[in-house]
Image (cartoon, grey):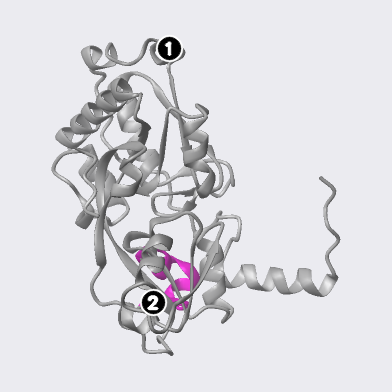
Amino acid sequence: MTPIARPAAWLAAAAATCSLVAACGGGTDAPKSESSIAVQKKDAALSAKLPADIRKAGVIKVGTEAQYPPFESLADDNKTIVGLDPDLAAAVGQVLGVKLVYTNMAFDGLLPALDSGRFDLVQAAVTDTKAREKQYDFVDYFMTGQAIVVKKGNPDKIAGVDDLCGRSVAVLKGSTQLKMLEGFNTKECADKSIMVTALPTDKDALLQVQTGRADATFTQDAVGAYNVKNIGGGNQFEIANSEALLPTPVGMVFDKQDSQLRDVLSAAIAEVIKSGAYEQILAKYELDGGAVDAPALNGAVD
């Protein structure tokens, strides 16, 4: 594809915009990979239950979208995927004696890629919903609410969903949060609709707020808290709602035909929880509040 020529002034403006949010490519504000997560002992009996092709290859292919810290993002080398999900996947891989290998792509392309067989599973902080469960199986391993992220100082005095009515809100394309906003427009904001802009990454949505093109973004609470703390030294954004909204489970996503792999991964996560490594991983990212006692199959609440 031939690159499109850009005026010099546009390039300068784009560079300035990128510097506001720090590392448009995802480098410097990515979580660090070093930690003291306990190494897991291989469970030979559980490993033997993996599908034969995966046992032979020694690899489970995972689709993700590495622009969503602290769940997954790019390290300083702009290649290595780091975060809660890769740490959990590494521990699961140790239990099973295989490697979970990630491929980074746009969020809204992940489930179609799973449908085509490109991946064995998807792990990208995907919210488990009743609608998604009609087509996919989830192994849920975390609980998160939703956050309204606004400019520091909250100039529009937004406090909850009702305050979004009639305002512009940026959101990740293909996300559950987009569906929630569309739902608000049929109920809470039926008389004064939210003006929703869906964008390829969560960082794109934050840029809309930073540059004044949107009044807020709507994202997972854990992601919102991470961005508020880490972008611009904590001086760019804040979470407008005092309590997390609409708690939902997050899980690994499987094709409904892959129940064998699904059940083995669920059992491996249970072993990681039992060992204490799960607790260590959550503590590393300050996400202890989203811990579950055991993985759940298709635990959607809505």
Q: Secondary structure at mark 1?
A: helix
Q: Which residue is mark 2?
A: 238
Residue 45 at what x, y percent from top left?
Answer: 21, 12
Q: Nearer the viewer, mark 1 or mark 2?
A: 1
Residue 52 at what x, y percent from top left?
Answer: 38, 10
Nearer to the camera, 302 or 209: 302
Q: Which mark is first along the chain, 2 or 1?
A: 1
Cα–Cα span, label 1 and label 2? 47 Å
Q: Which residue is mark 1?
A: 53
Going by the image, does 203 lie left or right of 188?
A: right
Going by the image, does 25 lie left or right of 254?
A: right
Residue 41 at what x, y percent from top left?
Answer: 24, 22
The span picked out in magenta is: 225-239
Q: Is residue 102 visible?
A: no
- Name which residue type carries label 2: Glu
Is 175 part of what is drawn in magenta?
no
Which residue is rendered at x = 23% and y = 38% of the image?
A: 277
Quadrant holding the N terminus: top right
Q: Which of the 4 image quarters holds residue 141?
A: top left
Q: Which of the 4 image quarters holds residue 38?
A: top left
In this rendering, is residue 34 above or below 301? above
Quadrant holding the C terminus: bottom left
Nearer to the camera, 179 or 220: 179
Is 228 part of what is drawn in magenta?
yes
- Name which residue type carries label 1: Asp
Q: Secondary structure at mark 2?
A: strand
Graded by Cα atoms within 10 Å as few (under 14), some (14 to 19) or many (20 or more), the crowding at tag 2 reads many
In this rendering, is residue 302 above or below 112? below
Magenta span: chief secondary structure: helix
The number of callouts visible is 2
Q: Which of the 4 image quarters holds residue 153?
A: bottom left
Which residue is rendered at x = 40% and y = 60% of the image?
A: 179
